[in-house]
Image (cartoon, helix red, strand yellow):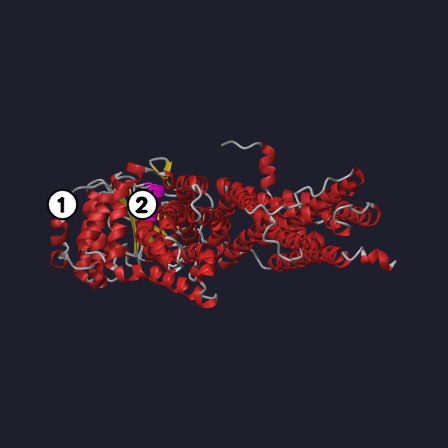
Amino acid sequence: MFEQLHFDLGPTQLALLVGPNGSGKTTLLRILAGLAPPTSGSATWKDVPISELVAEDRAEVAYRGHFEALKRDLTVVENLEFHMALWGREAAFDGVLAELKLNKVAHMRARYLSAGQRRRVALAMLQLSGATLWLMDEPTTNLDSEGRALLVEWTHRHLAAGGLAVVATHQPDEFATSGALMIEL
Amino acid sequence: MSEYFQMGGHGAYVWSAYGITLAVLIINVWLVRVKRRSALLRAQELATQAEVPRKQPTVRRLQ
Amino acid sequence: MKLPRWFHLLGSPPHVYRLAERLSPWLGGLGCALLAVGTVWGLGIAPTDYQQGESYRIIYIHPQTAYVGMMAYVVMAVAAAVGYVWRVKLAHAAAVSAAPIGAWFTFCALCTGALWGRPTWGTYWQWGDPRIMFEALLLFLFLGYLALRGAFDDRDKADRVTAILAVVGVVNIPIIHYSVEWWNSLHQTSTILREGGPAMTTDMLIPFLIMVAGFTLTFYWLLLRRLQAEILEREGSARWIRELVAEGAR
Amino acid sequence: MSAFNVVFVRDLRVAFRRWSELGYPLIFFIIVATMFPLALSPTTSQLREVGTGVLWVAAFLSSLLAVDGLFRSDADDGSLEQLLLSPVPMTLTVLAKLAAHALVTLLPLVVLVPVTALSYNMPLSALPTLALALLLAAPTLSVLVGVGAALTLSLRRGGSIVGLLVLPLTGPLLIFGTRATDLGLNGESTAAPLLLLAALAVLAVSLGPLAIAAAVKVGLE
């Protein structure tokens, strides 16, 4: 798919993955997440191969793929609670829900949410997981303009707070800021 | 000679057992030969096509 | 984990391909010769067994094919484990090559076992004989492996998933073997077909051992040939194959 | 143990939100158990003799029905990926999921099978042994079904192969289980087979999750 790719990312830095469908954006993200093994070379987080990260170190890397990882039969709150308990976080999430305009649907089952709302819950999960490295695969799909604005704003807030992000997207200019890495596959 | 093949009534079982074993051996040899031939043919085909260059991604920093 | 140098050599496809090319003729030739000698000796020269009469002559093929089936499964599982742990593609190729041969030999062992039991037991399928039951379960394990393998289209994923199944299978083999023996001992069915069969006089033993050697060499001959085909399929566009094919064409 | 509870409780909650689906394996078992007398003559003595084997095989077959609930439903909505990437080790998550699966599908069988055994006119005295044997066999069976589910995770039509992969491995379980039941029927001591079942359970629960976690990781690659 691709070879000879090398890049480093430090705190507060953003990397944008662009390229046509099938160029390997998702594959690269999954390698960075430690889900897929690279045929050669390695993806490391603080000099440790990502696939071998364990416990707290593992909690520093979060990956958001095409699916929102929501159980359709559980309510939004139940999904969030489960996710945070899994990641060992305790913060209250009412504020996050309010900001994402999800507080009205908080106790509805995920199956009844619109695709955009489910995307917002996924963003909430990402924010609440407290991970340092955000790996996002086309996060803006199904989001309305307001949702996209929120996503971009939260990403930059995350970067400003010393986080890192790798975003695969078809509209890089939405996220683009000076100093961001542009990786064309 | 026929007495030999009779083997005291057990001839049928002994010979069919050896027959099956021989058949299995021959089938395996034949399967391997077919697999090797198709693999070689495929390798020859691939040898004629030019090697597909893999794309080199570019990394640049935005101003 | 630093691996010894020869292990790396074993891991490089071109080297193994040429090694197989050199070894195969010897293995094949010697194996078939031994089989021929053993068969003639077993059928023609060896004395008839006082207890079982002539049907005991199947003892020159049934235990051997069963043993090759078992050996094939162990080879498959070890190769799969090596391939999975150290990501050696060639080890996966060896596991894939061993499976069909093992399945065929286990099937053959089942048939010859049934035929052997027929005159002594009166039925084609002796539920009482633990070894037949064990070979049947072993055959199912092989078929499960081949079915799972066939269900995948992406080869790397197929390799690693079937490797796990092979290891799970090999862990279960002693358990199955023990439980089948235990189950058989409960029903107190006297079985005279112990693994070694009736006490064998030396002139019966020699052809028996010749056949064991013959089947073993034949198995490894088939394995190497299949491995070569598997290497060609996996490394299809590699440069060394282009030269190889060019050599072959010239 | 809190991580175990988190996954365990969540799986139970998801399972009970669709409680109607929980009944399918049990109904399947009853159907299979009632069809055998149709095939055989309903004479009481023969039924009892065949009963043990029929009940155990039917129990194994019905446990295969719930295989998709284990991993596939989570894989389809992306939550299995998140479980794999979470700080909680995958083997622990697998253990929790297997425990939930066993509680939901196998435990009802441990109750249902002895009851059905009555219809096979087995004496009341044999039922405790049968239930105990099933209880001891449940962990191993759950692990084997888990291995089958994990191995066929990335296959679209994986369900059909699970039976082929799992059933040969249930051989020992079947032998020890039916043996324990038969001994229980004629009142002899059932210590040996039950202890062997327990040994298999310990082996399965300790080694199984490792293989299942590995298979899930590969399945999600």
| Type of the residue with mark 2 | Ala
Instruction: Tell which of C45 and D210 is nearer to you.
Output: C45
Quick check: D76 left or right of A72?
Answer: right
Query: In the image, is residue C82 above or below residue A155?
Result: above
| Type of the residue with mark 1 | Ala
Kindly give the residue lying farthest to the right in the view shown: B1
SS at badge 2: helix
Is residue C141 inside the magenta stretch?
A: no
- Number of marks present in the image shown: 2
Which-is-in-front pick, marks 2 and 1?
2
Can you identify the residue that label 2 sits on?
Answer: D96
Query: In the image, is residue A106 above or below residue D210?
Result: below
Q: What numbered label is drawn on residue C68? A: none
Quick check: A65 left or right of C239?
Answer: left
Is residue D92 inside the magenta stretch?
A: yes
Query: In the image, is residue C153 above or below residue A91?
Result: below
Q: State the image quarter where residue D204 is shown.
A: top left
Please report the bounds of the magenta region as a residue range.
D89-99
Residue in view at x 52 percent, y 54 percent? C144
Quarter holding the C terminus of chain C? bottom right
Instruction: Tell which of B40 and D31 is nearer to you.
Output: D31
Please state the horizontal and vertical placement of residue D57, each as a whole percent of the image.
Answer: 45, 56
Q: Is residue C14 visible?
A: yes
Please state the horizontal and vertical placement of residue A18, each as a whole percent of the image.
Answer: 34, 55
Tag 2 subunit: D
Alpha carbon distance from label 2 to label 1:
26 Å
SS at badge 1: loop
Residue in view at x 20 percent, y 58 percent? A148
Can you identify the residue that label 1 sits on?
Answer: A92
Instruction: Tell which of B27 and A69 is nearer to you.
Output: B27
Kindly give the residue lying farthest to the bottom in the view shown: D38
Instruction: Tell which of D126 and B1 is nearer to you.
Output: D126
